[in-house]
Every structure is written in C-alpha cells, then in structure tokens.
Image (cartoon, coloured by chain):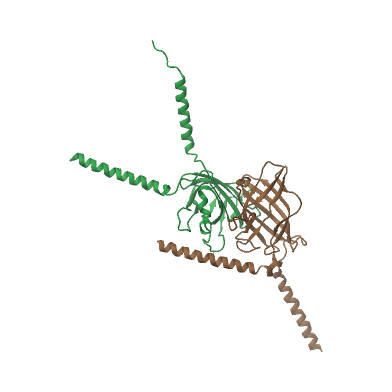
Chain colours: A green, B brown
Amino acid sequence: MKNVFSHVTQVGLTIMVTASIAGVISPQSAQAAILAGSQIDFVGRAEAEASFVDFEELIQGFPISDQAVFALSSSGSFAPITSSFLSRVGFIQDTFVPSSPTANWLTFGLYTSSSSDNFTFNLTSIIADVSGGRYNLTGVFQDGTAGIGEITTQIIGAGTRSFSGTLTAVPTPALLPGLAGMAVSVWRRRKRAATPEPITA
Amino acid sequence: MNFQSFGVMIGMKMAIVTVLGGGLSAIASMPAQASSIAGKTFAFHGSASLLSETDATTVLDFLPSYYAPTNDGQASVAFSSEIGAYQQQFMLKDIPLVKTLTGWSLTGGNLAWITDPGLVTYTLTAFNLSKTVTGFEAMIDGIFSPENLGTVDGYFSSQKKLATIKGTSFSADFMAMDKAIDQIAVPTPALLPGLIGLGATIVRKRRNHTIAA
C-alpha cells in the first residue's frame, strides 16, 4: 500500500519534472540555437547623442510609429528576417548611453504571423566612442547566444539622421570557462599518467 | 487573439499600400520640383563592402539591395530624405580608392556616383574614408547637377563588417548648398513676399498714373 503510493508519487513527480523541463526548454527548442557567425544588418533613423539614442519612426505611423529598424541583409540563423517586407521591420528601444542591461532591446518578427523570424536581442552594454553618434554593442540573443555589433550614424550636429547597424552572433562566453576547465583536467590526467607510480617496498 | 493580430496585419498591409502609393505620387511630382533641392537633406542607405583593407588600391563595392537582390550597386533613399521619395531606388557606382596615411581616398578623378534622371545627379569630387572605433566613416564632397550645387557636411558611415566580402549596411546624409553664395541657399518661397510687394507697388503706381491723367 505504502509502496504503491510512493510509486504513484514518483510517477507524478517524474511527470511534473518532465513537464517543467519541457516548459523551460520548448520555447527555445522550437527554434534551433543561433549559429555563431550569423549576421543581421539593419538601418533606420535616430537622433544620436553622446548620452542618449532616440530611435525614430521609419516613416510617419508605419508600421510602428516610433523606434523602428529595417533589416537590409541577413545570414545564417537570421536569414528568415529578410524573407518578407514585414519580417524586415524590427522594434528597437530608445536607450541611455552607457545603458543598464535592457531586455528585448531589439526585436524582429513582431509584425508577422510566422515564428521562424522571431529574434530578440537583450542589450548588455552600449558604449559611445569619443564623439558619440557611433556605438559598440554587446548582448545576448533569446537562446543565450552572445552577440556583438555596432551602430554608426553621421555626425553632423543635432537632428535626426539615418543610421546603419550590424549584429553578429559569437560563441557564448559562458561556455569558455567550462571548455578551459575540461582542458585543464585532461592535461592533469595526462600528466598524472606520465608520472611513474612510486615503487613501494 | 488570432483575429485581433490578423486585423492588425491587415491594417499594416493597408498602411504599406497607402505609403507606397504616396511614395509613387511623390516620384511622379519630382521633376516639377527639380529646382528646389538647395538646402535640402539627401539621406540614403544600402549595403557595401570594402574589398581590401591592406592593398594599395581597393574598391568600395556597393552590393545588391533588398528590393533588387540581383541588381549590384542598388541603394535606396532613406525614409527621411528631403531629396527623393520614400524608398526610391537608385544605382551607386563603386568607388575606387587609394590607401593614404589616414585611410582611403577617391582615386581616378571625379566620379559620376549617382546618375538617376528621375532623382538627382551627383558627381563625387572627394571621398575620404577612415577607420573608427566602431567601423568606418567617410567625408563626402561633390556637385549636384544640373543645379551645380555643392555639398554641406556630407558623411557616410558603416560598421566593422564593411571590411568583409559579405559587407554590411551603411547610411549617408548630406545637404545640397549653393556654392555661388557660399551658404545654404534661401528656399524659393522666401522670395514670394518680395514679389507680391513688387506687384503691389506696380499696381499702385499705375493707379496713381491713371488718376493723374
């Protein structure tokens, strides 16, 4: 009786654990991991200052009134973004420079029914070079893949200018310490194997 | 929820049609306004690649654009430009460059960079490209014809990936000026009050003349 009960509980737990794992993984596993080297190139309009970037509409009221970008070219995992006119339109948040980390800073796929062109870039840092108007970006895509890039615009005084930007997926830095650790342990094991066992009389 | 998003989609598609329609009518009305580019901003974007960073001579290669994926060198007038219509397409000639101490410069004399009778003709007289912390920047100088207008503060900018074969996006902003007066030309509407005043004076003089006779 007791055994049966605990067995049922175990099954229940297993189901719960499986369900929760699936719940955690499935939003990501619906889309394969972003390939390192994948590149997205976009353009838009912004009022770019040394301490703040105010992203503007592409054209009045279309298709979002403010904070829009338009993807010109893409490669690797980001290829679906340039598959249609609407999938090229992304949403980008105004930001202070330097910025505190911003979730969903740049989002593609908001205006299409397909999920294959859904990409989110969470901003970790945006740093202006000496003159402002040009920025280095670091962050993480929705599946944890790290991304780096830049936004550049024309420095011809105040006002709204056209800008261009690039984001590239790079191997996740979080994996590097793990790889380094693995290498060290392999090296240690080899060293140990190479050292002859002390002979005990 | 699906219905709602579907409705939004339809709304957006209608917006596109409206916008494109507006763009086309703007193109149609362009030639009539051909004499009014003085003091206006010309802004555009596209894709480009700097073929080599190390060679003594290289080329800034303009790549196919999103509307003409097979048409090499196609650029688009940016969304905000005062010269040209929304997303108007035009061709950009590749720019031959020579390496200098500070970067790269236009070589081989003036270049008929943009020759689009429906938009504008722009002859490049200087293109000085340099590397920045974030990518590349160039100072643009040239002449808009047939008005013979020079350039005020012309700039081109792009990202680090410009120096790859695949290239990246770029943007450019510059303003047409009147070299004859060496400042941004006064737009024609400013002349209208003067003309009206002149007309009024003539009418008054004539009336006085009639009364006197």
**In which image quadrant can residue B145 be found?**
bottom right
In the image, farthest residue toward the bottom: B213
Quarter of the image with the N terminus of chain B is bottom left
Q: Is residue B84 left or right of residue A29?
A: right
Q: Nearer the viewer, residue B187 or B18?
A: B18
Q: Say whether residue A83 is visible.
A: yes
Which residue is depicted at the point 64% across and 69% down? B28
Q: Nearer the viewer, residue B204 or B51?
A: B51
Which residue is depicted at the point 78% across and 85% down? B208
Which residue is depicted at the point 19% across and 40% down? A2
Quarter of the image with the C terminus of chain B is bottom right
In the image, farthest residue toward the top: A201
Q: Say whether residue A93 is visible.
A: no
Q: Is residue A175 above or below residue B190?
A: above
Q: Is residue B38 above or below residue A90?
A: below
**In which image quadrant can residue B154 be found?**
bottom right
Count every numbered label the image shows and give the total.
0
Q: Is residue A70 above or below residue B21?
A: above
Q: Position of residue B176 (x, y in %)?
A: 70, 60
Q: Is residue B42 left or right of residue A175?
A: right
In the image, farthest residue toward the front: B70
In the image, farthest residue toward the right: B213
Q: Position of residue A167 (x, y in %)?
A: 55, 48
Q: Position of residue B34 (x, y in %)?
A: 70, 67
